[in-house]
Amino acid sequence: MSFLKNLKIVAAPSKQLVSPEQHRRNKCVVKLAEQIEMADAELAGKTYERMKRAWVTDENGDRTKISRPARLKQWWSKDASGNVMLRVFYGSKPIELQKGKIAIEVGSMDKLPAILKTIKDAVIAGELDAEIGFIAKERVPKKKLKAA
């Protein structure tokens, strides 16, 4: 009895590769979604923690995988008068939103999630592709280790 005769077998489609611009947009959108979660949590009086998996070696030399909180950096700060100032980052570099300007004056903290969502929509629409591409091109690639 053949079980495979009951299945419809087809050739696998080729893997869809995304363009470098779309890849950079996706990375930025993920970070913006994380910032939105952080802002919502701060407004609710809670803390937002993203967990990441890490390998830990104990004193016997045994390796185990654990979950630990990832280090997150807020993209906003408050100035002396209490206004919230927002900088949008790609990697560790702030994105220049206008010529010579990298910050957005938000005002009060309750407006921050809406502004972050607006920026997320702008990234999805491709409005910041040139600025993100410039930052990505400046990046120095990690050197590959030579086999000993």
Image: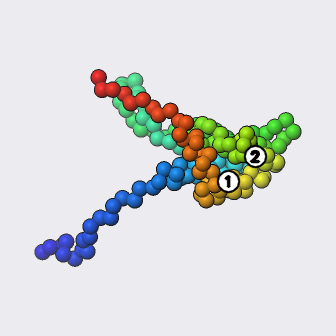
Find residue 146 and report its horizontal and vertical position in percent: 33, 26
Count every numbered label the image shows and give the total.
2
Residue 45 visible in the shown view: no
> Pointer 1: what residue?
119
> Pointer 2: what residue?
104
35 lies left or right of 142: right
Sequence order check, earlier mark of 2 and 1:
2
Badge 1 marks a residue whose secondary structure is: helix
Find residue 14 and report its horizontal and vertical position in percent: 33, 61
Q: Quadrant of the N terminus?
A: bottom left
Residue at mark 2 to residue at mark 1: CA–CA distance = 11 Å
- Which three-letter amino acid code belongs to the residue tagged 2? Ile
* Residue occupying the point 62% across, 45% down: 131
Badge 2 marks a residue whose secondary structure is: strand
* Residue occupying the point 53% across, 40% down: 137
Disc 2 vs disc 1: Cβ atoms closer than 8 Å?
A: yes
* Residue occupying the point 59% across, 51% down: 129
* Residue occupying the point 61% across, 59% down: 125
Find residue 118 and report its horizontal and vertical position in percent: 69, 57
